[in-house]
Image: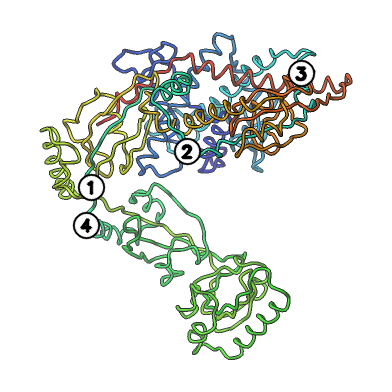
Amino acid sequence: MSTLKKIRENVGLVIVLIAISLFAFIFTDLFNSIGSTSDSSVAEINGTSIDYQDLERKVNFVERNATQDFENPEFQYEIRNQAWQSFVQEQVYRQEWQSSGIGMPDQELKYMLTGRIYHPYVASSGYFVDSLQRYNPAVVDQVLAQADQFNLADPNLPENARRYKQGLIDLLEILKLDRQSNKWQRLIANAAFVSDNEVLVSNNNDQRTANISYVAVPYATISDSLVNVSESEYENYYEQYKERFAQSEETAQIKYTYFPINPSAADSADTRSNLSKVIMDFTGTDQAYQYAFSNSDSRRLDTTLRPISALPEVVYDVLPRTDTVVGPVANNRGFSLYRVVKAEKDSSGANLKLRQILVRIAPGATSEDSTTAKQKARDIRNRVNSTNFAEVAAEESDDAFTKDKGGEMGWVSTDSLGPKFKDAMNNAQPGEIRIAETAAGVHVLEVLERDENLYSVAEILRTISAGTETQDSVYKRASGYQSKVIGGIDFDEALTDYQEARTNTSIDFSASEIRLLGLIGARPVIAWAFQNDAGTVNEEILETSNAYVIARIEKKSDGDYRSLDDVRANLISDVRRLAKARQIASKLKGAAGSGDLNAIVAAYGQGASTGSAQDLRFSSNDVAGIGNEPKVVGRAFGMQVGTTSQPIIGTNGVYIIKLDAVNDPIPLDDQVKAIQKQAIRQSKGQEAVNASYQGLIDIANVRDLRYKFERQ
């Protein structure tokens, strides 16, 4: 068991960080069951039905490696969503790897562990280390053999052994998946071919330049109020750019009224009373951290040693005692009990409880200003003492936050305000008055107390939640409202007698959405919306973490295209700009005449101007003087020198350009050509990998059916 003892408690965190780094999504343990009955299908991927239990195994992996607070319902769903993303991507990859003949033999995995196929995460995992805590491939066999002795199915297996074995399994699976992914990516990337002509075209795009003169008429020269857009113009624009509004998922929109479930004063009193009942046990236990963790509503176990300035103020009066519990103390999370568990000497510095009188030195002040401020601080130091400090602070201090509080700063670390402050306050003792400089100015400081310890505090937190009586009262109100709505009264009209309730209409949301305005833990409402048809009002009141909800499904889409009415508000500026473009282009075309740019400007009139741009490059859309205009750049490189274009409808305005010159690049020598060819091949290979993977996802026809298993 010696190796086991060396593994730190945060092995799970190490493994999850590895997982995130490897693939930009969290891989999970192997799933072996890929088909099941339709009743338990949680997804369809490439026509294959995926069983609910397979997804649950992924969720369990993410949960056991997560460090955040599981009390947050939105975080709980984020955990499940991370598992879902991994689930889909891994399934798509596995099918591709199988068809491509990509595998992972045991010997290859062994090479990854022993460094013959180097993988940095093996060395950083903390598993394969020697007595000096250094990665040592010689211990790999010993670690694997020892892990084989632990049976995860054994209910009597110690928790640290279970965590050790499971963490190792997770690490090995991550390595397998990463290795197979790399093989597949190399297979795709190495297929990229680059011809000599591609190198020439690439070099021309980067190095060949063009000089132009232009006439520009920005859209902003025409007021929006002068442009009337017809319904047919909206319809034509929508049809022309319909693919922009394609939806890959089903969506829904609901109108909903929610009744907040707010704890009452009685609920607060009950929470405080119940927390008080554990004070005696918390005081007497010799396992303070563990006791606090198992009795707290927070799932964080913090054993960090901190200076007094970083502690809750309520424990100041009991320091450094470790046998006293403070509380219950009200805070923005509920009520807390605190117990100081450790107090150790701080070798790095000290904390001082101070009060101050600040003489501010403004940024950019002269040396004379600085000298004046220092002299003023010395004068104050000569007249101040413990008796009159508060009076002088109110009179002289330039710090608005402390001057009316007697100059009280609270506890301050000697390291926190810069090296000059630390030097000035070195070995300062209670009762002393010193002068110190910081970025803010010159401080006259009185030392009230000095503390040279670090402390660890255990906390038991109890959040205040609504009790049964409160919930019943809110539920009855929600039921009354629901009866009116089901009886045919409009949502808003029914609110007249329910001032505590709020009504919202959601935006279109997909089945993977986790939030609705005003609600915490909105998944039950979202799941209900996808389990019912448009027009439905929930017959059973929906419950979220903070409210009871009555909802009506306004509409549902089948994942085809968003309608014109849905996107109309987003089209206004584009359709109006297109109308302006046609108007400007028509007038410019009529003014073109001989092609003289100055004559065109004169004929067009107000709003038109001329300019020039040098060194345009096909690989860049930027045009000096007019901004990002890809159509202008593209047109310039398709013209003959000396010719003038027709009006070009661009991003920011309409343009007529004249090509003044084209500057060809210097021919490439063989060595440079070879270097550029390799660079293009690498870029092309990565593009091929990305496109191939995205293609696999696109054709997988993933159907997300998770909402079938969510409780309403």
| Quadrant that contains the C terminus | top left
Viewer-closest of 640 and 411? 640
Residue that mark 1 sits on: 261
For residue 146, say whether it is visible.
Answer: no
- Residue 203 placed where, x, y %? 79, 23
Looking at the rendered structure, the secondary structure element under dot 4 is helix
At 26% from the left and 24% from the top, the residue drawn is 531
Which disc is residue 224 wearing?
Answer: 2
Residue that mark 4 sits on: 270
Amino acid type at circle 4 is Asp
Which disc is residue 443 wearing?
Answer: none
Question: Residue 511's quadrant in the figure?
Answer: top left
Looking at the rendered structure, the secondary structure element under dot 3 is helix
Gap between marks 2 and 4 measured at Cα: 61 Å
Q: Earlier in the sequence, mark 2 or mark 3?
A: 3
Nearest to the eye among marks 4 and 3: give it. Answer: 3
Amino acid type at circle 2 is Asp
Classify 10 Å Cα crowding around label 2: few (below 14), some (14-19), many (20 and above): few
- Residue 593 placed where, x, y %? 68, 25
Gap between marks 4 and 3 measured at Cα: 76 Å
Q: Earlier in the sequence, mark 4 or mark 3?
A: 3
Decide if residue 312 is on the left or right side of residue 279.
Answer: right
Residue that mark 3 sits on: 201
